[in-house]
Amino acid sequence: MLRSIGILKTSMRAFSTARPLFNTQTPVVPTLTWNEYFQKKKERSWINTSSGITTSFLSTTAAWAYISTVTIDPTLTMFGMDPLMALFGGMMLSTATGYMVGASIIGDLVFSLKNRAHMPEFVNKEKIFLERIIKNRPDPSKSNVANPVPDYYGEKIFCLKDYKKWLKDCNTYKTRSHTFL
């Protein structure tokens, strides 16, 4: 009766076995290769540096705009020093703060928004990479001018070739530190 007045409409297709209603296959999770990870790491470094430079320029401009409006009395001191030195120090502090904010907060935000599809994989690969760096890096207590520590945090590794070179440099450092001490 309900079907005849149009309230209950059922499709025979919904009850047929020709095609399942739900996707029974597990979704394919794309994997991030090591080369892609290193490319994204290099991209993150570039984004962090460029955003740091941009925000340091903006913060320096804002500090200069403020400093240009301040009246300076040469007979008085600011923070126990010459007013020009205090204002110059404040401007340099503003520049450094702008760079840190740009590189650490804004750069990471831009990178994570740009690569949001791969971020869980990127974070996982980075964790694995840093564990390998910690496991393979040499003891820095035996360094000297003739035998410096090779890239302690692995910040300059942007491809597998760089990683292999870093491992080779670490082994060279270890043998030199044992041989020449």
Image: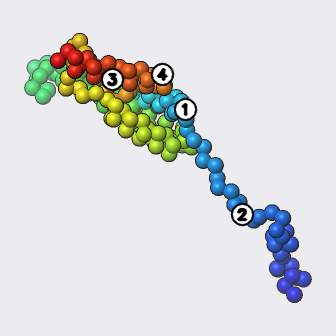
Check residue 36 in the rendering and tell me which mark sits there, or answer none: 1
Q: Which quarter of the figure has residue 12?
A: bottom right
Q: Amino acid at mark 2?
A: Phe
Q: Amino acid at mark 3?
A: Cys
Q: How many marks?
A: 4
Q: Please rate how many residues cluster around mark 1, counting C-alpha atoms within 10 Å: few if below 14, some from 14 to 19, many from 20.
A: few
**Please, is residue 9 above or below residue 164 in the view?**
below
Q: Secondary structure at mark 3?
A: helix
Residue lying furthest top: 146
**Mark 4 in CB contact with mark 3 (< 8 angstroms):** no
Q: Which quarter of the figure has residue 50?
A: top left
Which residue position holds label 2?
Answer: 22
Check residue 161 in the rendering and tell me which mark sits there, or answer none: 4
- Tag nearer the camera, 2 or 4: 4
Disc 2 versus disc 3: distance between alpha carbons?
53 Å
Check residue 170 in the rendering and tell me which mark sits there, or answer none: 3
* 2 or 3: tag closer to the N-terminus: 2
Q: Amino acid at mark 4?
A: Lys
Residue lying furthest front: 179
Q: Is 147 on the left or on the right of 73, as rendered? A: right
